[in-house]
Amino acid sequence: MIRNQNPLFDSVLATLTDRQREHVEAAYALLEHSREPVHRQELHALQDPTSRDRLEQLLRHTGRVLVQVDGLRFTSGYDDTVAAQLTAAGWQPLTTVERAVLALVLIYSVAIARSEERLAPDTWTSPYPTTEADILKASKLPAVAAKAAASKLVAAGLLTRVRDRADAEGGYVPGPQLLRLTPAARARLQEQLILAAAPNHPLAAAIRERRNRTASRENIR
Amino acid sequence: MTEIAELPFEEHAADSAVLALYRQVFAVLARDANQMVDDPALVRVDELILNAFASAGPAGLTVEQVIAACGDTSPVAVRRRFEVLRSYRAVTKVNERPNEMFYQAAFAPYVMLLFLRRLAQTGGLGELHQMLSIARLSIEDADTTLEQAQAQLQDLANVFRLLANPIMQMAKSGTVESLRSSAQPMLGNSELIDKATVFHNLATEKWPQLLPECTQLRMALAAYRDAVNAAARRLIDRAGRTRALGLLPAEKWRSFARDATGDELAAALDGLLFDAPNPHFTVDDLLDAVEEGLRTDTGRTPPPRPRIDDEPGPEQVGADMEAELLATRAEELLAGRDEVTVAELLDTAGDWAAGRRVLSDLTAIGLRPELPYLLTWGDGLRINVVGDLTWVTDGWFRRRTPAEAPA
Amino acid sequence: MNEHDTALWWAKIRSGGPQQAPAGSPSPAGMRRLVEPDAQSVWFLPNLPPSAAPEVLAEYRQEPATLQDSAGTLRVFAACLRCCWPDPGTDLWPGQPADLTDVDQVLQQLTPGRDRASRRKLLSASLRRLEASRWVLQTADRVRLGPRVTGWGSLELSTLRELWRMIPDPQPKSDPGGGEVP
């Protein structure tokens, strides 16, 4: 079992000093494996332009990009073109019920909270739990499958289980994984939810029109 | 007298009736004669006055009775509003004679108040929906004249133009904030356009001679639709990554969450990829878990408490779970020792309530032969009148030796 | 395989876990290639240098993704290790499949507080979790080690051998319920 040789890492990091290489590899590990986004002061590779460039190259070679969560914290996410290509080819590891449960939590915890002006920051996280009843009883999803899906989504960090002090039933909020979405993926998620929930609304028409504009621009290019 | 001679008089009479009603209706909006009201409290006083007249019956009310009926409102304010209403003839004497003390109110101003309140709540869209419903009914009504239909078409065309103009203005040059704040009612109106289109189509069929008016309405509708779309486009372009979600009303989201199929919900995540579960643990974590498990076999260290994601089965919640909890509690009480006196446990428990809990836990543990602990009682009695616990019996709580294991 | 296809493979494994491919498939750069015992297919999984692996997180006091009910799940995994690795002198992968009843018997030694039903529950929930990240692979009533076990280096393997010796044999017992006292 050869463990220490990785041609991909070697080719990207070859010209770096030992110290730079150590910083880039550590930053890669922190960005890719941390449960939560990482504070920039832990990411020494970001301080030096060469190291930062190699870090971004390394991520790109593995289908990833650097994602800035806020002014101070970073994480990594899927390269938009890679995700688009894989999903267009039918690659979607989450089952329909798993995606449906995640969508429900995003609706109850984020979309409704936003319509009711309870959320300020422009992110896919929220302190407002979606209750188990919202998912298992008030939806059209089969309860047993939905419960198993929720537990898998918790394991993947897409949902976080919360337990309200007053409410023994508990619920779910969007998990730290959602912070890994790139700006384009976040915008896409917003658009898809609006298209799904209100296909006849003027906003949905505006979204479709914008997508057509982008698509025709890309065709010309 | 010819018919021709009658007309101007009838017209004049109709005009003055309209004018009188107009004056009455707008009395509630007049601050003083010839001045608009700009304080909602004044409208509230008008409402109180009109309410008082409604309850009064046909005899009417004197000014003093009106003031009394308006309760806490300052008599000066009531008197002032009363005079304004009177000057616009919204309130009139029951009998036109010099010494008449009793007044009565017209109904139109009250209707206007109701209308204004609804308008304030819905921005006039509710009224517009009703107007469209009435217009639609009038097409099917055989008594509707060509002139009435013509007037309705023109009215509606004007309404939609007036609606479209400010939206378009905001979409082009207003601040995004102003656009966003009026987005929910403004954009959620596709029904309005649908309703107006139905009316337009029926009207063209029934009155082909009104083609110019129908065209005007169609153009007004198109302008409205353009304005709404331009506003939606601007909002979406400037909405960030989640803010556009707030442009749909919460009820829309709720009904989607309730009624959508799994496929429809899942479609919202089309084109997105997320990470597979990839939990990390070290070989040492593995070693710790195993060592702890093996140790539990002999030493009965507390088994792990179930976590909320542990999906406990019903049987786990039952007897066995309780045994685990009691074993945990026993180890807490022994705190590494093999034997401890009940008195000592009660002393360290602190207050009476905690002491009682210790006693009830000890008893529960003692009643479980499968747990390797023994509780024995002596017959001595310790009196302590100053402490919280006034008596403590002699008792010992200890670990059972293998030889003492129950058969 | 070009850079773009390599990136696609990495993203595929990141989102779907270690992937199985037909035996002849070319290896994406930086991936470990594991041939299945029947030589019909191969597994691909990232071969990260230790300095870019999750172990680094501890130095920076960052939390990695953790197992749910980790103590219970790890005991189940240890029981699988004991049963699927018949000779600790050999490599861990591919090991050999074991019956779930054997795994359950070993688990009984590691979780003495639990009754039979609760242990079964722990076993099935833990196996589901472990399989989701390919620490184990499951067929109807058998289990084997998953490709992820190949990530351990020689130092870790010696600890695992120690662990193996610590865990009692999966020998048939007269009391299959275990832990229960009338």
Image: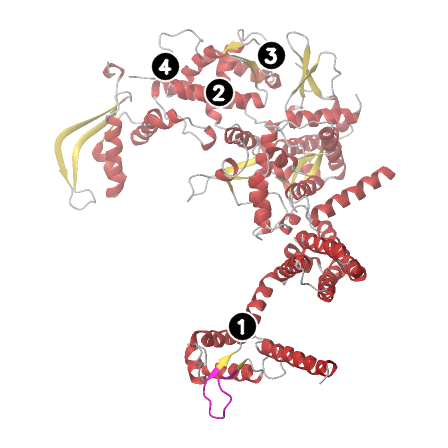
Element marked by disc 3: loop
Question: Where's residue A143, x and y in %?
Answer: 50, 31
- Mark 3 belongs to which amino acid? Trp
Tell which tag, 1 or 4, sits nearer the viewer.
1
Alpha-carbon neighbours of circle 4 within 10 Å: few (<14), some, or many (≥20)? some
Of residue A179 and residue B142, the one placed in the foreground of this image is B142
Tell which tag, 4 or 3, sits nearer the viewer.
4
Q: Mark 3 points at which residue?
A: C93
Q: Is the magenta stretch mostly helix, strand or loop?
A: loop
Examine the rendered structure and indicate whether residue B398 appears above or below residue C40. below
Examine the rendered structure and indicate whether residue A221 appears above or below residue C49. below
Q: Disc 4 or 3, which lies upstream in sequence?
A: 3
Q: Give the range drawn in magenta.
A: B92-103
Question: Where's residue C15, x and y in %?
Answer: 65, 28
Q: Name the residue under label 1.
A: B110
How far is disc 1 from disc 4 in space, using C-alphas? 83 Å
Q: Name the residue under label 4.
A: C178
Q: Residue at x 53, y 45 (%)?
A: A128
Residue B227 appears anywhere in the view = no
Q: Which colour scheme is used?
A: secondary structure
How far is disc 2 from disc 4 in space, using C-alphas? 18 Å
Examine the rendered structure and indicate whether residue B202 appears above or below residue A166. below
Chain bearing tag 2 is C
Chain bearing tag 3 is C
How far is disc 4 from disc 3 in space, using C-alphas? 31 Å
Q: Name the residue under label 2.
A: C124
Alpha-carbon neighbours of circle 1 within 10 Å: few (<14), some, or many (≥20)? many
Which image quadrant for residue B199? bottom right
Looking at the picture, do discs 1 and 3 lie on one chain?
A: no
